[in-house]
Amino acid sequence: MKVKRFFAKSMAEALKQISEQMGPDAVILSNRRVDGGVEIVSALDYDENMARQSLGEKASEATNGARLAEMQAEQHRRLEDELSRSRSRIRDVRENRAARSQGYAEASFAELHEAASEGYEEPASASVSSNTDYSDELASMRAEISSLRDLMSGQRNEPEEPGVNAVQQRLAERLQEFGLSPDLAGSLSRRHKSGKLDDGWKRALKMLVTGVRTARQEWLDEGGVYALVGPTGAGKTTTIGKLAARYVLKHGADSLALVTTDRYRVAAHEQLFVFGRILNVPVRVVDESHTLDDILDELSDRHLVLIDTAGLTSSEKGYQEQLTELARSHHNVRTHLVVSATSQPRIMKSVWHCYKMANLSGCVMTKIDEALTLGESLGFVMETGLPVAYYTDGQKIPGDLHHAEAVPLVRLAVERLKTLQQQAAAERLPDAERPRETA
């Protein structure tokens, strides 16, 4: 993270300096009026986690991101002022020493010879005083240099990994801000051996595009039996409704059927029946009298069958039974994990571990519109190797459903990061400088 302070006569001039010297990715940490204009503290590759580590215990005083950025800016101001003071002291010591040496050099040879011929000896006190002054000067310079060293090391509490250069470190920080895990961000950044940060960023995004697998063909055209599994609230039933509505609009209702295996909760399948009535599509329920294979045998003439499941955890009754039923079916059931983009990476991986026994063929990403960043989701599918079939970004049926492609997904994630950075920068501007909405 690179932090720099700018002074200008106006806010517009200061922002121009930031754009020219730090580029469009710079983030404004603070701004204030000073004598003769404005002062802005800006950062490149700003990371809140690193800022908190840099501030130490003081970070607990930051109640929000804006306050944390202001405290980081204050620390940078104190650092620059202390650096300036230390440099000034070292310069004064050097100038005093140079002046004293110049004075000795200007003494005439005759005067020195005369003093020597008269047997003149410098008083011991004077000699001691001169040596003491020189020792004091050296001690002062060493102290200031040590102080500078301590200040600079204080800015970097976390030592860089062996073999990792500054550009790789900054690239890893940007990738973590993008939403990737530290391990994945570090792995991608270390592949950028040399060159500019922007070149490394573009290369990392290309590797993400390569690493994110997607389904080649849409289910609606390919046909088959597809089951959606995942925790309660991930959006399984709504996603099935979107898929069914789109299929009916394109191919009609005669070759589509909906199935639910959720017989564990009261009225759990009511929403699916509502979709069935609206679309005029049959809905079948797996229960004690009708197994999954029995129902799929009856629906073998249907081009597309969509299976909704119960969002059970590993500790709930029926969890093992439901997944085993899907995995052991003699029909080719392609099971897909439904993952919410708003979930934390640990939760995503935990959900994957819970449902991978169902022989997962891929995943569906939901609630893309509600996520602040999308790097977490992209990192998840890259690390697990699950192909992304679809993603959803709203509640509209069937409008907010999209067939997944790697390039648009990564581009969307980059745009989301830029929007987040712009919002954070706008929050740090004073009210007078914020753009106003027009009626």
Image (spheres, grey):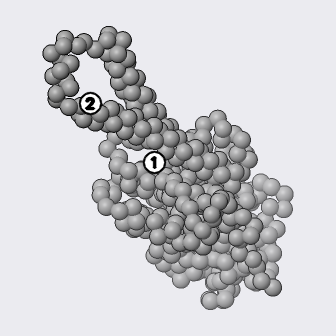
Residue 336 seen anywhere in this rendered image of the structure: no
Q: Residue furthest right?
A: 266
The Cα atoms of the two marked residues, 2 and 1, are separated by 62 Å
Q: What residue is drawn where x is 55% and y is 52%?
A: 47
Residue drawn 66% across the image and 51% down it: 70
* Residue 62, position as x, y percentages in the image: 70, 45
- Mark 2 and mark 1 lie on one chain; the one further toward the N terminus is 2
Residue type pointed to by label 2: Tyr
Residue drawn at (60%, 64%) of the image: 421
Does the CB distance between marks 2 and 1 fall below 8 Å? no
Left or right placement of residue 390 versus residue 261 in this view:
left
Q: Quadrant of residue 46?
A: bottom right
Badge 1 crowding class, 10 Å Cα cut-off, few under 14, some 14 to 19, many 20 or more, is few
- Badge 2: how crowded within 10 Å, few (<14), some, or many (20+)? few
Q: Quadrant of residue 279?
A: bottom right
Say what amino acid the circle numbered 1 marks: Asp
- Whether residue 275 sits left or right of residue 66 in the image: it is right
Numbered disc 2: secondary structure: helix
- Left or right, residue 329 beside residue 239: left
Helix or strand or loop: what does disc 1 sit on? helix
Residue 277 horizontal/vertical position (percent): 80, 80
Task: From the image, tell me which residue sits under label 1.
Answer: 183
Q: Which residue is mark 2?
A: 104
Asked whether the viewer can see residue 46, the reply is: yes
Q: Nearer the viewer, residue 128 or 84?
A: 128
Residue 212 position (above or below residue 89):
below
Between residue 13 and residue 87, name the one nearer to us. 87
Q: From the viewer's perspective, is the residue at label 2 or at label 1 nearer?
A: 2
- Front residue of this view, candidates 149 and 234: 149
For this view, does 94 lie left or right of residue 438?
left
| Coordinates of residue 282 in the picture (x, y in percent) | 73, 77
> At which x and y percent is residue 292?
65, 62
